[in-house]
Image: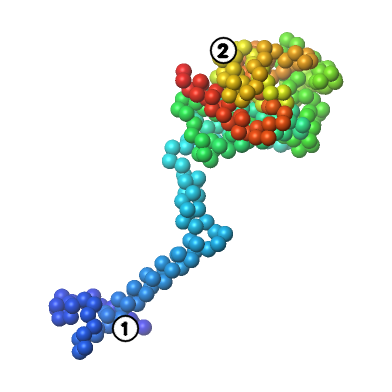
Amino acid sequence: MHDFRPRPPTLAGRARRPYGTIGRGAPRSRWYGWYWFAAAGVVAVLFVAALAAFRPGQPGVAGVTAIIHDSAPAAAPIATTAVIGHSLEGRPIEATSIGAGATLVLIGGLHAGPEAVSVDVVDDLREDYVSGDRELLGGVELVFIPAANPDGLAAGTRVNAAGVDLNRNWPTGDWSAEAIHTGEVVSGGTAPLSEPETRALHDYLVDLRPALVLSVHGFGGVVDDNEVGRASELAARWAEAAGFEHIEEWTEYEISGQLIDALAGEGIPAADIELAEGDTRPTATAREALEAVLEALAAR
Ligand SMILES: [Zn+2]
């Protein structure tokens, strides 16, 4: 055991026997075997590494490169997720923020169940930027709140766990406990902001003072803004890029106590995005539209 450790070759030894020669009669020191042993070891390590890299079903060299890219994109800003409040049944309402500058907030799922596609779209857009797949323009902050009504999402309902329509529960001049949706009476709550979900959103948005709030709904293929600040200009960008109609006002039925009107009272630009029914790639449509809005937002 103690004899396996090689001694360093002496200058005299090298001079006597050129490196690598196997001459008949040349003196074979213990060194000679050690070199071959080390070389065989290197070959074995390379072989095992190659096996690991090319094992079927496992990430190979390209896969490893991609994982490194995903986990550490060179220029992607850090995203932070905060719980801004809880639903009636205690589910967290999360907001993910990325970038710095003029803030654009995207809200999904206020009408949860039947409009669950809005949750998927906002969550997909969030993933675009958090993963670094899409690069955020400088001077812009994006905030994603994919599931604003988590109880309704869990139950598959439009309303929250108290049966309140969360887009009829905001402090506006026209708030009413008896509200309307497609000709039916829906609850606007016992008072404006009677629900924990709307309170959480309201307090968060009023404190944040974003440059634009986009509340994503389904369906209609229209964009309806609150005419505050740049709301109409930016809403027009979304409508044009998505191929939606930019409407002056929702005229199909009376909407009382809605989010974008309450934000108008706070001086915060906002718009409702009604996704197009039958769009088989709603995220792709929203992605183009969001990019158009962000370019306009970043240009100032
Ligand atoms: Zn809706």
- Quarter of the figure with residue 45: bottom left
In the drawing, does residue 13 fall left or right of residue 89? left
Q: Nearer the viewer, mark 1 or mark 2?
A: 2
Badge 2 crowding class, 10 Å Cα cut-off, few under 14, some 14 to 19, many 20 or more, is some
In the image, what residue occupies the spot 77% across and 15% down? 252
Indicate the position of residue 90 as horizontal and vertical percent values: 73, 36
Indicate the position of residue 235 as horizontal and vertical percent values: 60, 18
Residue bearing mark 1? 3
Q: Is residue 112 above or below residue 1?
A: above
Q: Is residue 83 above or below residue 185?
A: below
The quadrant of the image that shows the N terminus is bottom left
- Quarter of the figure with residue 175: top right
Residue bearing mark 2? 229
| Three-letter residue code for mark 2 | Gly
Q: Nearer the viewer, residue 127 or 222?
A: 222
Q: Residue furthest top?
A: 173
The kind of secondary structure element at disc 1 is loop
Q: Is residue 90 above or below residue 215?
A: below
In the image, what residue occupies the spot 73% across and 26% down? 219
| Three-letter residue code for mark 1 | Asp
Badge 1 crowding class, 10 Å Cα cut-off, few under 14, some 14 to 19, many 20 or more, is few
